[in-house]
Image (spheres, grey):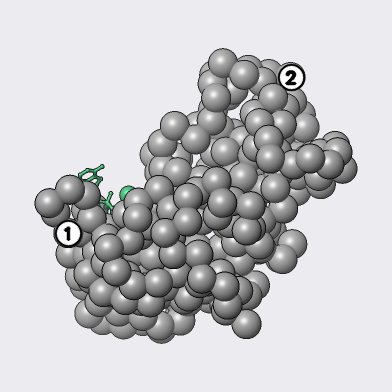
Amino acid sequence: MKALKVANLTAGYGESEILRNVSVELNDAEIVSIIGPNGAGKSTLLKAVFGILRPRSGSVELYGEEITGLSPDRIVRRGISYVPQVDNVFPSLTVEENLEMGAYIRSDDSRPRLREVYDLLPVLQERNNEKVSRLSGGQRQMVAIGRALMLNPRVLLLDEPTASLAPILVEMVFEKILAINRSGVAIMLVEQNARETLKISHRGYVLAGGEKRFEDTGESLLKNDDVGRLYLGGEG
Ligand SMILES: Nc1ncnc2c1ncn2[C@@H]1O[C@H](COP(=O)(O)OP(=O)(O)O)[C@@H](O)[C@H]1O
Ligand SMILES: [Mg+2]
């Protein structure tokens, strides 16, 4: 079953066309990574999937239903949560308040889900009454991800969750991403830590200059000499 099917997507800003004819898929229960140089269009792809940016052509399907051109508000209700690269938390609110904000569209009791999110990300429970502005970068990323999980998404879009984190925290974030995936969430992951990302990904895509350049299993991309030389900084 395909969680997401992005077909021939073209999107951009104003006069400039950034993504050209990009097709990517995310299977149910998969972690799929999108890697590639700065400016490749990775964030643009996630924005177009989530409806922040209206695609110029092409289509996006979520579990077989077309969601192309829907607003983020509609898309979130269909079961996709998105964690942007920046400004993904409310620093002046506490951890728990941030999580509750994440559940804003729920009409039912969000407490049971809050407990599940705390079970998945115990650091959030430990710091639940702390203002997010007082947390480390790694903990803030956990808050952002926890907030996105409050709606029980079927699909999670993560934009560079490990950006500017120390290596030990990068590892911690990747472990949590794996745990979230094992809890049944399909994950599309945009990352600069490409080598590490491919190690935890079932499949990956290399995006460069707004176009798809390579697609394969994480393992095969890691072994691909061209991918290694061009996009993974040489020998691993
Ligand atoms: N809001 C925007 N308005 C105009 N151009 C943008 C905007 N956001 C990104 N771009 C441009 O789109 C291209 C791709 O950006 P982006 O998708 O953020 O790349 P990546 O996430 O791969 O680093 C870049 O050339 C960038 O300057
Ligand atoms: Mg980006």
Q: Which residue appears at 66% of the width and 31% of the height? A: 101
Identify residue for label 2. Answer: 129
Residue at (79, 40) in percent of width and height: 107
Q: Which residue is mark 1?
A: 17
Q: Position of residue 171 (x, y in %)?
A: 54, 51
Taking the image as shown, residue 12 lies to the left or right of residue 85, namely left
Q: Amino acid at mark 1?
A: Glu
Q: Name the residue type under label 2.
A: Asn
Crowd band around label 1 with a 10 angstrom C-alpha radius: few (<14), some (14–19), many (20+): few
Q: Earlier in the sequence, mark 2 or mark 1?
A: 1
Asked if residue 78 shows in the view, the reply is: yes
What element does badge 2 sit on? loop
Q: Residue pushed farthest left?
A: 15
Q: Is residue 125 above or below residue 211?
A: above
User: Where in the figure is residue 158, as x and y percent of width and height?
Assistant: 49, 52
Residue shown at the point (76%, 29%) measured from the top left: 126
Q: Residues within 10 Å of mark 2 (few under 14, many from 20)?
A: few
* Residue at the spot 44% in from the left edge and 40% down from the top edge: 165
Q: Is 147 rendered above or below residue 60?
A: above
